[in-house]
C-alpha cells in the first residue's frame, strides 16, 4: 500500500465513488453514517486496517482516508510503527515542514495543512495516518478526477 499525499493510497484515489471502491475492495466489513455529520458515509475494511469517508455533499466522492496498516509505505519506506521524527523527515520533500501539533496526553497528532496529512502518534511512533482531499480555496476541494 503506497501513500500518495493529495491523491490517496494505491488506486484508492480521492474522488472515487462507493461503486468504484466496492469494485476494487469488495463490500466493507462495516459501513455507517457519521453521527456528527450525516453527509459523511464511512466504510471500514478490517483486514486492510482502512477507513474511507465519502462526502455525500460532494456527489458521494471519496474524500478522506484513515489507515493503520503496517504495510503502508511512503516512497517505498514503512510508515506505521516507525519513529515519528523519522517519518516526518520522510515527508520533508512534500511539505514545508509546518506541522500543527496537538497533544492529547496519551497520543499526538501532527497535521500538515498543505497536504491535508495527519500523522497519529503514540509513544513517539506512528499509529495511523489520515489524509484528505486538499482544498483549492475556502469553499472547494481539489478533485483531481
Image: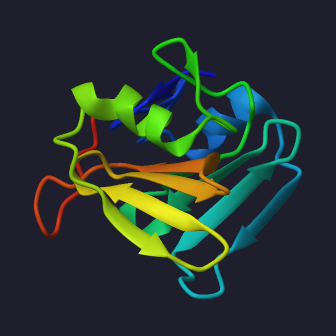
Look at the image and tell me in which quarter the N terminus lies. Answer: top right
Q: Residue 20 location in percent, x, y?
A: 60, 34
**Is residue 62 something that shows in the picture?**
no
Residue 128 appears left or right of 77: right
Q: Residue furthest left?
A: 137
Q: Residue at x 55, y 70 (%)?
A: 40
Decide which of 92, 17 is in the foreground and name it.
92
Q: Quadrant of residue 25?
A: top right
Q: Nearer the viewer, residue 41 or 82?
A: 82
- Tell me: residue 72, above or below residue 46: above
Q: Residue furthest bottom?
A: 36
Quarter of the image with the C terminus is: top left
x, y percent for residue 52: 62, 51
Q: Residue at x 49, y 63 (%)?
A: 109
* Res. 29 visible in picture: yes
x, y percent for residue 4: 42, 28
Taking the spot 71% from the left edge, 29% from the top edge, the residue there is 23
Depth order, front residue of 40/47: 47
Residue closer to the observer: 2 or 37: 2
What is the count of numbered marks? Answer: 0
From this viewpoint, which residue is outermost toward the top?
A: 76
Asked whether, in this view, residue 82 is left or right of residue 25, the answer is left
Q: Is residue 141 left or right of residue 78?
A: left
Q: Position of residue 138 (x, y in %)?
A: 13, 69
Amino acid at each position: 500500500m503506497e501513500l500518495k499525499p493529495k491523491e490517496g493510497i494505491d488506486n484508492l484515489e480521492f474522488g472515487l465513488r462507493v461503486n468504484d471502491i466496492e469494485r476494487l475492495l469488495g463490500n466493507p466489513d462495516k459501513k455507517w453514517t457519521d453521527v456528527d455529520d450525516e453527509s459523511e458515509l464511512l466504510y471500514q475494511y478490517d483486514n486492510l486496517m482502512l477507513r474511507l469517508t465519502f462526502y455525500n455533499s460532494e456527489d458521494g466522492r471519496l474524500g478522506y482516508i484513515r489507515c493503520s496498516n503496517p504495510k503502508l509505505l511512503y516512497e517505498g519506506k514503512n510508515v506505521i510503527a516507525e519513529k515519528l521524527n523519522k517519518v516526518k523527515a520522510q515527508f520533508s520533500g512534500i511539505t514545508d515542514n509546518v506541522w500543527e501539533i496537538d497533544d492529547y496526553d496519551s497520543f499526538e497528532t501532527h497535521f500538515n495543512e498543505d497536504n491535508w496529512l495527519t500523522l497519529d502518534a503514540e509513544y513517539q511512533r506512528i499509529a495511523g495516518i489520515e489524509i484528505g482531499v486538499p482544498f483549492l480555496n475556502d469553499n472547494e476541494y481539489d478533485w483531481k478526477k
